[in-house]
């Protein structure tokens, strides 16, 4: 419940503002209203309902046990006179338990609790009235004790608490005025005495509720602040791992990813390919068209590369000024070359201007490809070095081409290239 309330609070600026306003007030002046009051009620309902149900069950059990002991220990006539009024408590208690088993309309739960308490207190009083004699006064005092325990432990709205507090006082005064053993003044004085005690209990219950509400407000505020801090940390993490110009991952993020995929071993479990992509004669583009056009070129090339790979498992990072590193997971040479050629061809087809280029009047890419097959030993640093070597050869042999690095092993061709 707290998590849900915390989420609602942090998502609602009005609730957050109201929380801050309430926490600036004195503790005794805190009053929850509206949405915050609803959140608080939802927060404490489960605990309150458990307490009320447990209290009702124990009252019913104690009532049954007391009636059974009375049948054994008291004269038969007195014990039998207590049975009928005492039998009211178990069914009333169970009815309240049923109502409080799950959240219902507030008015229904309040009415059921107040009505149930009235019948339970009336039952306790009638047991003493029916038995008469010493039991008359004793059971009226027991009735007050039962009410006080309910007031103390029931974390319910103040209006409900006041109603429950008024019930035993009214019943006490009514039955004491009918008590032939005491005078009117004594009955009134005793009622006033117990009134002061019960309403002191109500005041204590109110303080407990206010403290619980203040704690809830602190929890809401802390939850919001933690969420804000988490969001800020997430933004910082994204900034630390994202290239601000292209929006791609940066070199640091890619290095961490490679370490995680290889897991300290010398092989990627599913095999992998690296593509080192470099914009041909990018410095000449900057010198001729300016850095603003160079930045636009980088952004557009980054977009083309990102659109040319699988977003669910491949990864792209801006690795240097005009260099991009592409990690293809679980692919072989043929697929890696196909992706690289698709990237190169898409950049050439986009025809971004580079009038000073020695290759073309438009932007072109040179791409070096290195592949680690499944089960082959090769660290990510070695794989990247092979892609760099292939890129260097692609630059040396004319640019605007894809070149695959191949190790010198028997039965394998020396190099593959496309242009």
Image (tube, rainbow, N blue to C red):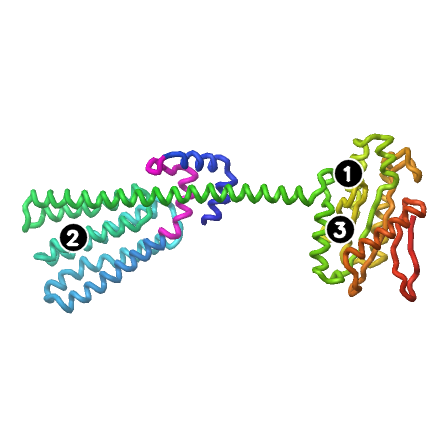
Count neighbours of disc 1 (C-alpha within 10 A) and say few if under 14, some if 14 to 19, many if 20 or more.
Answer: some
Which stretch appears magenta?
A: 26-48
Q: Earlier in the sequence, mark 1 or mark 3?
A: 1
Q: Earlier in the sequence, mark 1 or mark 2?
A: 2
Q: Which mark, by number, is residue 158?
A: none
Verify whether residue 31 appears in magenta.
yes
The residue lying at 85 percent from left, 30 percent from top is: 289
Question: Left or right: where does residue 170 sit relative to residue 49?
Answer: left
What residue did someone put label 3 on?
A: 310
| Towards the viewer: 48 or 378 | 378
| Towards the viewer: 144 or 364 | 364
Question: Left or right: where does residue 356 sit relative to residue 134?
Answer: right
Helix, strand or loop at disc 1?
helix
Question: Left or right: where does residue 243 sit relative to residue 414?
Answer: left
Real-space Cα distance between discs 3 and 2? 79 Å
The residue lying at 73 percent from left, 43 percent from top is: 248
Among all residues in the image, which is located at the extreme bottom? 72
What residue did someone put label 1 on?
A: 299
Residue 335: percent from left, percent from top: 83, 55
Q: Earlier in the sequence, mark 3 or mark 2?
A: 2
Real-space Cα distance between discs 1 and 3? 19 Å
Residue 239: percent from left, percent from top: 66, 41
Asked if the residues shown at circle 3 and circle 2 are in contact, with their CB atoms under 8 angstroms apart, the answer is no
Question: Left or right: where does residue 400 sit relative to residue 72?
Answer: right
What residue did someone put label 2 on?
A: 141
Dominant secondary structure (helix, strand or loop) of the stretch shown in magenta:
helix
Helix, strand or loop at disc 3?
loop
Verify whether residue 139 appears in magenta.
no
Residue 353: percent from left, percent from top: 87, 34
How many marks can you see?
3
The residue lying at 85 percent from left, 42 percent from top is: 279
């Amino acid at each position: 419940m707290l998590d849900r309330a915390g989420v609602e609070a942090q998502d609602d600026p009005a609730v957050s503002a109201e929380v801050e306003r309430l926490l600036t007030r004195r503790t005794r002046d805190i009053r929850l209203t509206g949405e915050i009051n609803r959140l608080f009620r939802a927060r404490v309902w489960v605990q309150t309902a458990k307490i009320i149900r447990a209290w009702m069950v124990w009252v019913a059990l104690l009532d049954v046990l007391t009636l059974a002991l009375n049948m054994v220990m008291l004269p038969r006539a007195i014990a039998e006179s207590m049975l009928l009024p005492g039998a009211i408590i178990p069914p009333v208690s169970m009815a309240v338990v049923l109502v409080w088993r799950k959240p219902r309309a507030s008015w229904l739960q309040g009415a059921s609790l107040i009505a149930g308490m009235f019948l339970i207190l009336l039952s306790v009083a009638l047991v003493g009235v029916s038995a008469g004699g010493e039991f008359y006064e004793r059971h009226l005092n027991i009735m007050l004790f039962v009410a006080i325990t309910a007031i103390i432990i029931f974390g319910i709205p103040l209006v409900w608490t006041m109603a429950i507090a008024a019930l035993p006082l009214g019943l006490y005064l009514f039955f004491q005025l009918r008590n032939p053993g005491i005078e009117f003044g004594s009955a009134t004085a005793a009622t006033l005495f117990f009134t002061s005690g019960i309403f002191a209990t109500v005041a204590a219950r109110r303080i407990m509720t206010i403290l619980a509400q203040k704690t809830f407000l602190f929890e809401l505020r802390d939850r919001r602040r933690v969420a804000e801090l988490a969001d800020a940390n997430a933004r910082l993490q994204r900034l630390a791992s994202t290239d601000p110009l292209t929006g791609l991952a940066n070199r640091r993020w890619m290095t961490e990813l490679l370490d995680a995929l290889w897991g300290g071993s010398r092989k990627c479990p599913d095999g992998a390919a690296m593509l080192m992509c470099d914009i041909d004669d990018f410095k000449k583009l900057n010198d001729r068209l300016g850095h603003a056009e160079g930045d636009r070129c980088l952004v557009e090339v980054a977009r083309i590369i990102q659109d040319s790979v699988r977003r669910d498992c491949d990864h792209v990072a801006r690795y240097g000024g005009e260099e991009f590193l592409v990690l293809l997971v679980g692919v072989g040479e043929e697929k890696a070359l196909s992706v690289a050629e698709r990237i190169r061809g898409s950049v050439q087809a986009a025809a971004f201007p580079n009038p000073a280029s020695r290759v073309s009047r438009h932007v072109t890419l040179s791409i070096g490809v290195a592949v680690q097959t499944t089960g082959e030993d090769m660290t990510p640093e070695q794989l990247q070095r092979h892609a760099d070597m292939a890129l260097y050869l692609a630059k040396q042999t004319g640019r605007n081409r894809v070149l695959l690095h191949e190790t010198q092993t028997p039965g394998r061709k020396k190099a593959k290239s496309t242009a």
